[in-house]
Each structure stands twice: as structure tokens, then as C-alpha cells.
Amino acid sequence: MRIADSPKCRWTLYLAAGLALALSLCLPTQMHAQKGYNAVCTATSVANINCSLATLDASQFTGTTICQQIYNALSYLSTLYSPNNDPGAVVDARGITTGLTCSAANETPWTSGSTAVTTPAIILLPAGLITISTGWIIPDRTRVFGEGERSNPAAVHGPGTQIMAGSSFSGTMISLGGNTVYPSTSTYPCGSATGICFGVSIADVMINGDFQTITGIANVNSQELSYVERVNLYGILGTGLSITTAQAQNSGPYSNITCNPGPSGTSFASTTTCIDINGTGDLRGIHGFTATVGSDLICPGVTCPAAAIYLDSDSTTIEDAHFEGFATGILVGSVAHAKGDVIINVNGGGSTLTGPTVDVVKISSNASDLAIMGVTASANPSGNANSIHDTLNTPAITLTDSHVALYAIGEAIGTSGYSRFTTSASGLVPTWGAGGGAPGAGSCKTGSLYSNTAGASGSILYLCKASLWVAIN
């Protein structure tokens, strides 16, 4: 049946719609709660309530220094949650602007005199210069974030967070976990002497060694989900970042790291280095790294550090790295065996301010099964750096190519050599080339092979003998 469209009908419909809208505004309706954090509580036995992520303002806790205030906040947090069930609250210290010098004995965010607290947390540090006299040992499941690297390490105020070693500091400034007790206590940062830490990290800070022969950051037993990111290692005349022992396996990645031990005129030891990886396999790698040092222009010399990175570990990747002023960018296998490592996209050079880089990558006696891809040797005050220096061979192989796409070393063959391949056309290393014709009359490296892909009616395979190509098939 058709209903006639008339003014009376239309007004009736409008009135009905208006009445429905009015009722919807006046009558109660069922609402759906907005989803968010669970309720914050102090007991886990409250029915239908789950304790959740809490944020504590460290500036509201007692203490005359930032270390004391963070320690007291963590101590309070430990009364809310048992250590095994703590979800990892946020201790926000960004509001603390005074008392940034922690000079008392054993004064850190986790220790006070003879007591220690290891309640897991996310700690947010303020911008400014934080001076420490006792090394910080970050416990299990704890992350520390600053407000970014400081562009001017000499500035007391300004953007970014700087942690600086106090005068006469010794040891390690920042430890990711540890296998010994906190000083003067019986508390282990990872639970016991044999405990392993997980989820330990530090990010967005400058670590300033104040030109002392110390270690900036060390990891000896923090594994999965433990990392260092966006950190500037400055003024450290010992080791900037140390990753050692098998207990630190599976940690990383260690990414976006800048290292500058000091400007020209600083007295460096040959052992001054940015990263030392020793005896730790299966790392998540070093990704994004820049190392510059103001060494002399006669390198290696008394004030020229020997290497920016010591790689003495297995199954480790180093990629996207730049070096200036170190005798060697990456030194592989000089102390312990280094097998199955991969180096990708690295370059070295220098200037009159930083001094030269002699070898971008140097391969020492304990290396094997090493793959190097994408090496660039840039200009130095004294000429181009060597892209690759391979001392496994006798005599040593030194590639001066500006760019090397691939250099690979495999296993030892007897007592006289290694399986080895490179794309370098320097004539120093045997290669296997290919082309749509004979190799020509040019000299070659004895032992090289060449495949003629268009040699259906002629020679297909050539061997370099006495520096000349000889058809063998």
C-alpha cells in the first residue's frame, strides 16, 4: 500500500524524529568504559583489580642528591610489589635540577652505604651534568633513559643528559648487570653469583670519562633484550664499551654509538679504544657507529690508539661504521678467535684535526670464516687509508683500493694458507672472474681462475700461471 506524501505526513515524521532524539538525550543509556591502564593499587589481593604500571616522581622523595632520591623512590616501589612480580614502574627523575653530584661512598640510584635495592624499573634521567664517584650497576630488568646526547660536554647546563666520572674515578662507570655483589653489600644485581640479567639497557646519554683511563660501559652477563642505544662515549682513555664473556651472549644491538676519546693534544695510550668485544658470541651486533680521535699525524705513533674496535668474538656483525684517527678501524682476531663474523659498510679516513686511519679493517692471526662487504678507504693527511690489511697471508696482503665490494676468508688449508676470495682487481689475491671472452693479455695473480662464458667453440676455463693466463679447458 502506498502512503501519500503530504505536508501533514511530513510534519508527523519530523515530530516523531524530534521526540526520539529528546528521549535519547534525557534517558540513561549504557556506556562502554574507555580502555587504559589497570588501576594502580598497593595490594594484589583486591578482587577484580590488577596492579599496573605506576609512575613515581623521584623529585618528591627525600634526598639531597639525584642518586638518593631515585634510591628512595625505588625503595618505596619495592614495598608495593614483590621483586618477582614487579611489572617495571617508571621512576621519573626529570624534575630534579639540583644535587646532580653523587659523591658519597657507594652512592648510586641502587645503593646507599651498605644497602641495595634491585626492584626493576624504567628510570628517566633529567637533562644536565650528573657527576658520579661510584660506578652504576644497573640491575635485572631495568632500563635507564636520558634526554639525549649533549653536543657540548663542557657545558653544565643545556639539552641532553651527561654522566661524568668524578675526579680519581676508577673501574667502570656503567655496568649492565654484574656477577659480583654491589660494593659493601650482599646483594647481586642479577640475583646471584651465577645469575643472568635480562632487559638491561641505557640510552640517550653522554658518558664522559673526564679523560681518565677507565671503562665507560661494560656488559659481562646481561643477555636478551639488553642493549646500548644512542650513546656518546667521550673522554674515555681506556675502553668506551666493553662486551666480554659468554654470559653477555644474545645481548644488543648496540646501535647509534658515537665515540670520541678526546681532541688533538690529548695524551692517548695505544690501548685506548672505543669498543672491545672479547669472548662473547652471538651478539645482536654493532649497528651505526662513528669513532673519531684527535691523534697525531704520524700513525701509528705514541699518541695514536691502535684500534677503534677490537673484535675477538664469534658470530658478530658490525655495520655502518666510520673511523678517523685510529691506526685501525676494526682489528679482527688479535687476542682471541673470531669466527663467523660479518663486517658491512665501513669506511675510514682522517683529517688534520683527527689524524689518519692506516687500515680500515685489519685481519689478525685468530680470524677465520670472515666476510667483509663494502669497505671504503677515504683520504688521509698522509694519503688514502688501506681498505683491508690481511696478516693471515705470508706475505701480508694490503689492499689499497678505495672501495672493496667483497673480501672473504674461510678455513685454514693445511699450514700454508686459507680459502680466500675478493672482488678487488689489485692482483694481490687470487680471484675467479668471468666474462664474455678471453681474459686478454694482462697480468694476473698466480692461482686465479677465469671463466669464458662465450667459449662454446674455444677455451672455457683459464688459470693464471706465472702472472699470465693459460687456457686449461
Image (cartoon, rainbow, N blue to C red):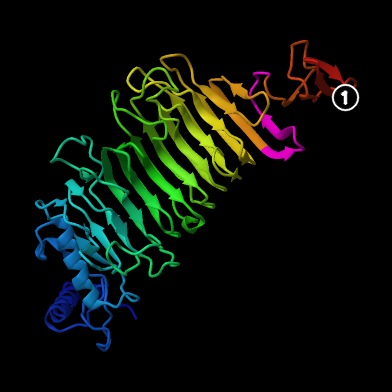
User: In the orientation shown, which residue stands out farthest toward the top?
Assistant: 441
Q: What stretch is highlighted in magenta?
A: 410-427
Q: Where residue 423 appears, x then y in whole percent?
A: 65, 27
The answer to whether residue 264 is above or below residue 248 is above
Q: Which residue is drawn at the image coordinates 19% and 60% (left, top)?
A: 92
Question: From the viewer's perspective, is 411 left or right of 104?
Answer: right
Q: Is mark 1 on a helix, strand or loop?
A: loop
Which residue in the protein does label 1 denote?
Answer: 456
The amino acid type of the residue labelled 1 equals Ala
Q: Which residue is drawn at the image coordinates 11% and 61% (left, top)?
A: 59
Q: Where residue 459 appears, x then y in whole percent?
A: 88, 21
Quadrant of the snapshot with the N terminus: bottom left
Dividing the picture into quadrants, the one containing residue 327 is top left
Q: For this rendering, which residue is in front, 228 or 278?
A: 278
Q: Where residue 182 appears, x then y in whole percent?
A: 30, 63
In this view of the protein, can residue 39 be seen by the observer?
A: no
Is residue 418 one of those drawn in magenta? yes
Q: Which residue is drawn at the image coordinates 77% and 13% (left, top)?
A: 440
Dividing the picture into quadrants, the one containing residue 401 is top right
**Mark 1 burial class by Cα count in 10 Å: few <14, some 14-19, many 20+:** few
Is residue 200 one of those drawn in magenta? no
Quadrant of the snapshot with the C terminus: top right
Q: Where residue 21 appears, x then y in whole percent?
A: 16, 76
In this view of the protein, can residue 345 be seen by the observer?
A: yes
Q: How many marks can you see?
A: 1
The answer to whether residue 203 is above or below residue 139 is above
Dividing the picture into quadrants, the one containing residue 374 is top right
Question: From the viewer's perspective, is 454 left or right of 182?
Answer: right
